[in-house]
Amino acid sequence: MTPGFTAKYGCMQLVWYEEHLQIGTAIQREKSLSAGIGNGRST
């Protein structure tokens, strides 16, 4: 993040969200993101 933004708004963490129409696709996406984090990869 840009230093000016983090200082201005006091951001400490980056948060990401996605909307899904079906719960199955949301769960599948969450699992793929978790697998990437566990392996030290970013998606």
Image (tube, rainbow, N blue to C red):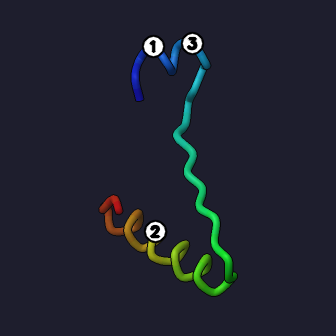
**N-terminal-most mark, 2 or 1:** 1
Asked whether disc 2 touches disc 3, contact meaning CB atoms under 8 Å apart, the reply is no
Which one is in front, 4 or 13? 4
Residue type at mark 1: give it.
Gly
Residue type at mark 3: give it.
Lys
Asked which quadrant contains residue 26, the reply is bottom right
The C terminus sits in image quarter: bottom left
Residue 34 point in image, percent of width and height? 48, 69
Q: Residue at x 58, y 82 (%)?
A: 25
Q: Which residue is drawn at 64% across and 65% down?
A: 19
- Secondary structure at badge 1 equals helix
Residue 34's tag is none
Kindly report the distance in space between the C-alpha atoms of the residues bearing marks 1 and 3.
Answer: 6 Å
Residue 4's tag is 1
Residue 23 point in image, percent of width and height? 69, 82
2 or 1: mark nearer the eye: 1
Which one is in front, 17 or 36? 17
Image side of residue 35 versus residue 11, left or right? left
Which one is in front, 25 or 12? 25
Most distant residue in the bottom direction: 24
- Secondary structure at badge 2 equals helix
Kindly report the distance in space between the C-alpha atoms of the residues bearing marks 2 and 3.
Answer: 29 Å
Residue type at mark 2: give it.
Leu
**N-terminal-most mark, 2 or 3:** 3
2 or 3: mark nearer the eye: 3
Kindly report the distance in space between the C-alpha atoms of the residues bearing marks 2 and 1.
Answer: 29 Å
Residue under label 3: 8
Most distant residue in the front direction: 21
Asked whether disc 1 touches disc 3, contact meaning CB atoms under 8 Å apart, the reply is yes
Residue 36 point in image, percent of width and height? 37, 68
